Amino acid sequence: MKKLAFNNNIKILRFMSNEMTQADLGEKVGVTRQTIAAIEQSKYSPSLEVAFRIAHIFGRPLDEVFIWKD
Amino acid sequence: MSFREKMLWVAFIAMIGGFGFYFLTLLTPIGQNASPDYYLGLLFFIIGLTIGSMLVATLILFIRNRSEVTFKEDERDRNIHKAATQIAYYPLLLGVWGSGALFHNGVSTSIMLNILLAVLVGAESIRLGYQIFLYRQA
């Protein structure tokens, strides 16, 4: 499986947001729980729109949610 | 496993099982010596059985996964669908052109129709199988 060029802090941010579940986040973003799980595990690269939506929900800038690997 | 993925498994198993049985029957001595009416009857029986088993399985999945049934296809689902359709397009194209070449070499209409059906079932099985593979990967 091809590894993505970036990591993410979604799992940590979910727990910091009252232990939000993947299903809750998925519902807010407009994707399925499975898609959130795939993004979290760096198995799926989300579109820019979904990435921005996730960052917006946590109230963080995009580069705090998704971190480019140098 | 999501409802969508389970539905893909149902369609994949029903297609491989149903049409696999049909094509294996055609390869047996009984199938090879049978009349076109026999093929047609068997084909309609298999199609009915495949659709019937898919409906029953869908109903069971629907009852057991009610919360997920209303979920719309999201971007990942669409990407997976698109990638699998692209992969399945090439064997379909090759199969249709290959069948056309066979037809010009004097293959009978009934065999020709079965070859085209096999190409269609093959391409659809590749599409469903690749979708399942991609869901398992990501």
Image (cartoon, coloured by chain):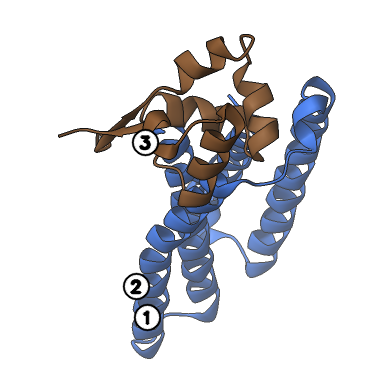
Chain colours: A brown, B blue
Say which quarter of the image contains residue B56: top right
Q: Secondary structure at mark 1?
A: helix
Q: Quadrant of residue A68?
A: top left
Q: Which residue was labeled with disc 3?
A: A63
Helix, strand or loop at mark 3: helix
| Mark 3–mark 1 distance (CA, rounded to whole Å) | 50 Å
Q: On the image, numbered disc 2 is attached to which residue?
A: B94
| Mark 3 or 2, closer to the camera | 3
Both on one chain, marks 1 and 2? yes
Residue at image x 56%, y 27%? A58
Does A17 sit above or below residue A4? above
- Which of the pair A16/B93 is nearer the observer? A16
Q: Residues within 10 Å of mark 1 (few under 14, many from 20)?
A: few
Residue pointed to by mark 1: B97
Is label 1 in contact with label 2 (beta carbons under 8 Å)?
A: yes
Give residue B136's position: percent from left, percent from top: 43, 30
The residue positioned 36% from the left and 29% from the top of the image is A42
Marks 3/2: CA distance?
46 Å
Give the label on residue B12, or none: none
What amino acid is found at the position of numbered circle 2 in the picture?
Leu
Q: Secondary structure at mark 2?
A: helix
**Mark 3 — on which chain does it sit?**
A
Q: A56 or A43, which lies in front?
A: A56
Pointers 3 and 1 in contact (C-beta within 8 Å): no
